[in-house]
């Protein structure tokens, strides 16, 4: 994940450096390039949340009070970039991704669990294959199903979930591993305020 995030930050830095050089030539260019500046700000903000998520999962707990209800979008995109670096791929989500309920555990475990199952399941596939997956939010809970056979890494992931998110469950069946989440942990984005 770190190489992907470093690449994103480097791209934003390159954009800001170019904008700074342009402003040295034409101070009035800022208004014309305000959209580029806003785009760089969004990328840096997103990368900052993902870096804090990674640091928190490693034990630093940098996420603190920062929560991203819509964090699954950038997280899934980051996992896809990580898998592509390893000659795997992640299918596009079917429809709009649900929102994260910010009150789960210390805030980082839920998005980390979602990103981890996608990444570990994707890596378990043969090279150059795409992980097909789906997320479903129901009235009794949510599930994220990955169509990949179980592996030792997925079994370790299941043990991690049992420890860090005891109300969640990981179930394996032939050809699929599913992360089951309690009601309210993933929210229908259409119903979110």
Image (cartoon, rainbow, N blue to C red):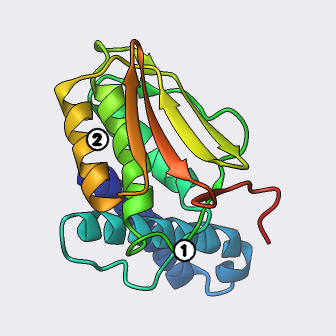
Q: How far is disc 1 from disc 2 in space, using C-alphas?
A: 36 Å
Q: Nearer the viewer, residue 142 or 59?
A: 142
* Camera-side residue of 58 and 80: 58
Above or below, comparing residue 137 to residue 5 in the picture: above
Quarter residue 10 falls in: bottom left
Per the image, label 2 sits on a secondary structure element best described as helix
Residue 41 or residue 29, whichever sits in front = 41
Q: Earlier in the sequence, mark 1 or mark 2?
A: 1
Q: What number is the disc on residue 41?
A: 1
Q: In the image shown, does 135 or 80 lie closer to the viewer?
A: 135
| Neighbour tally class for label 2: few under 14, some 14-19, many 20 plus, Cα within 10 Å | many
Relative vertical location of residue 163 with respect to residue 93 in this rendering, above or below: below
Which is closer to the viewer, label 1 or label 2? 2
Q: Which mark is residue 158?
A: 2
Q: Is residue 97 visible?
A: yes
* Whole-percent x, y for residue 49 in the image: 43, 70
Q: Quadrant of the C terminus?
A: bottom right
Which x, y percent locates residue 110? 43, 59
Provide the secondary structure element on which disc 1 rests: helix
Q: Residue 7 location in percent, x, y?
A: 33, 54
Position above or below: 126 against 48: above
């Amino acid at each position: 994940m770190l190489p992907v995030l470093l690449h994103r930050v480097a791209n934003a830095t390159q954009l800001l450096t170019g904008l700074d050089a342009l402003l040295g030539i034409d101070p009035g260019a800022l208004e014309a390039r305000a959209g580029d500046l806003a785009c760089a700000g969004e990328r840096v903000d997103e990368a900052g949340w993902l870096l804090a998520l990674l640091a928190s999962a490693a034990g630093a707990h940098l996420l603190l009070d920062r929560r991203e209800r819509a964090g699954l979008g950038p997280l899934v995109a980051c996992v896809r970039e990580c898998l592509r670096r390893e000659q795997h791929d992640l299918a596009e989500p079917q429809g709009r991704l649900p929102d994260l309920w910010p009150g789960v555990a210390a805030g980082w475990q839920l998005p980390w669990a979602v990103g981890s199952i996608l990444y570990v399941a994707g890596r378990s596939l043969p090279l150059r294959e795409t992980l097909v997956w789906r997320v479903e939010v129901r009235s009794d809970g949510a599930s994220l199903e990955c169509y990949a056979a179980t592996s030792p890494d997925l079994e370790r992931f299941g043990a991690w979930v049992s420890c860090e998110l005891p109300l969640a469950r990981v179930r394996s069946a032939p050809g699929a591993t599913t992360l089951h989440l309690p009601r309210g942990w993933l929210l229908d984005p259409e119903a979110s305020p």
